[in-house]
């Protein structure tokens, strides 16, 4: 059975969605990052980068949410695009776009707006601009077709959904009004039973909610020195 190391952040949520959609048997293993559990030797033996999610599939360890999605899709044969070079090229391109653009710029936008110890206007402006630039590209694409890779719901839509649900936190409360095609996809996925089971997963384990000194040290070790 797959061990799924997770919390309720955007990146683990997209993997949880795939697991629920695919029906693959899995055991959720909580990693409370605000308590610093991601830095324990037991966990860094699984993911040296000390982040969630990770999976252990009967001895096959995979970390990084987008790598996990691709691994699970290929393992199960589900939620992949049509088996043509063009479709696979689009799938890989947009999956990596989420991995290298949507996630990092969205995360940095939140960090510098909400968690930086002192305001840095240049950083706030840069990451806000880049986050919007990436989301506008996605919104334009979804305005031309129902899903990220053509007419079929795939792992790329799941990868996007993890962060898209957090768009108001990343971009501001008016984000979905400015990204109507992203909102359409999010609403559609949210209505799926699998997405509702992902939300129910939050009730399986209790995670620390306070962002106190312990959490800051766990999240930002460079600030603890």
Image: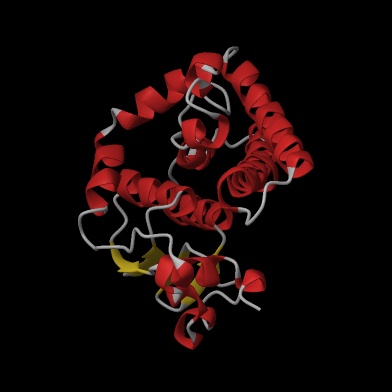
Res 221 quadrant in image: bottom right
Judging depth in this view, the residue of 44 and 154 nearest the camera is: 44
- Check the image and tell me how it is coloured: secondary structure
Q: Residue at x 76, y 37 (%)?
A: 126
Does residue 64 appear left or right of residue 186 in this picture? right
The answer to whether 124 appears left or right of 20 in the picture is: right
User: Compared to 61, does 103 lie above or below?
Assistant: above
Instruction: Determine the residue positioned at 34% across, 47% down.
Output: 22
Camera-nearest residue between 35 and 45: 35
- Rendered-image quadrant of the C terminus: bottom right
**Residue under the image location 33 percent in, 31 percent down:** 190
- Residue 135 falls in image quadrant: top right
Q: Give the x, y percent position of residue 98.
A: 62, 41
Residue 48, placed above or below residue 172: below
Front position in the image: 122 or 64 = 122
Residue shown at the point (44%, 18%) measured from the top left: 184
Q: Is residue 190 left or right of residue 51?
A: left
Q: How many marks?
A: 0
* Residue 93 picture location, percent across and down: 70, 39
- Can residue 78 be seen at all in this image of the molecule? yes
Residue 26 in percent (x, y) is at: 30, 63
Q: Is residue 146 visible?
A: no
From this viewpoint, which residue is outermost toward the bottom?
41
Considering the image in quadrants, where does the N terminus appear?
A: bottom left
Q: Position of residue 115 (x, y in %)?
A: 57, 52
Give the residue at the far front of this rendering.
118
């Amino acid at each position: 059975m797959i061990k799924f190391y997770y919390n309720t952040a955007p990146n683990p949520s997209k993997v949880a969605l795939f697991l629920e959609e695919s029906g693959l048997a899995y055991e959720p293993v909580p990693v409370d990052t605000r308590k610093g559990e991601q830095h324990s030797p037991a966990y860094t033996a699984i993911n040296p980068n000390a982040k969630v999610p990770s999976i252990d599939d009967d001895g096959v360890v995979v970390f990084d949410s987008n790598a996990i999605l691709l691994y699970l899709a290929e393992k199960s044969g589900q939620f992949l695009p049509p088996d043509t070079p063009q479709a696979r090229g689009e799938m890989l391109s947009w999956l990596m776009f989420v991995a290298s653009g949507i996630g990092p710029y969205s995360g940095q936008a939140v960090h510098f707006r909400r968690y930086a110890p002192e305001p840095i206007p240049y950083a706030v402006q840069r990451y806000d601009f880049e986050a919007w630039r990436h989301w506008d590209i996605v919104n334009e694409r979804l305005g031309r077709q129902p899903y990220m890779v053509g007419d079929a719901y795939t792992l790329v839509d799941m990868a996007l959904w993890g962060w898209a649900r957090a768009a108001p936190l990343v971009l501001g409360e008016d984000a979905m009004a400015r990204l109507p095609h992203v909102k359409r996809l999010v609403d559609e996925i949210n209505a799926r039973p699998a997405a509702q089971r992902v939300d129910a997963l939050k009730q399986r384990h209790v995670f620390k909610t306070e962002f106190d000194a312990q959490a800051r040290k766990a999240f930002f070790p460079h600030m603890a020195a």
